[in-house]
Image (cartoon, rainbow, N blue to C red):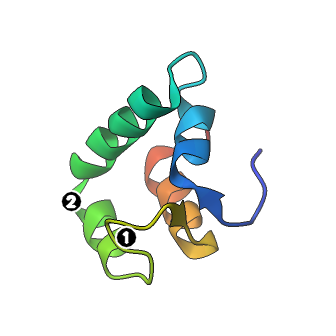
C-alpha cells in the first residue's frame, strides 16, 4: 500500500513499473492514463498540469482509483 501523499511523477511510475528505467516507467504510466479518458480529464482539471513534476495527493488517489494500487 502506498502512502497518502504527493508523489513525483517518475517516483509513482516506478511503483507501477519497478523493473523499468524512470523515463520508460513514466512513459508507460502516461500511456495508461491516456487510455482512460475519465482519469485524464480528472487529472487535467487539478492544480498540477502537464509540465509539473509531481502528482498531488488527490491526483494520486484518483490514479489508484482508476488503475488500482501498484
Residue 2 placed where, x, y %?
75, 49
Tell me the CA gap for discs 2 and 1. Answer: 10 Å
The front one of 29 and 22 is: 22
- Residue at position x 53%, y 44% in the image: 10
Q: Is residue 69 above or below residue 38?
A: above
Q: Which residue is mark 2?
A: 37
- The image quadrant where one finds the C terminus is top right
- The image quadrant where one finds the N terminus is top right
60 left or right of 34 in image: right
Furthest-top residue in view?
Answer: 19
Q: Which residue is mark 1?
A: 43
6 left or right of 1 in image: left
Q: Is residue 38 above or below residue 1?
A: below
Residue 7 placed where, x, y %?
64, 58
Residue 53 placed where, x, y %?
49, 61
- Residue at position x 32%, y 82% in the image: 45
Amino acid at each position: 500500500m502506498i502512502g497518502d501523499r504527493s508523489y513525483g511523477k517518475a517516483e509513482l511510475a516506478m511503483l507501477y513499473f519497478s523493473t523499468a528505467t524512470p523515463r520508460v516507467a513514466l512513459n508507460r504510466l502516461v500511456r495508461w492514463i491516456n487510455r482512460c479518458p475519465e482519469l485524464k480529464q480528472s487529472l487535467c482539471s487539478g492544480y498540477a498540469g502537464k509540465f509539473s513534476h509531481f502528482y498531488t495527493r488527490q491526483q494520486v488517489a484518483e490514479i489508484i482509483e482508476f488503475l488500482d494500487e501498484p
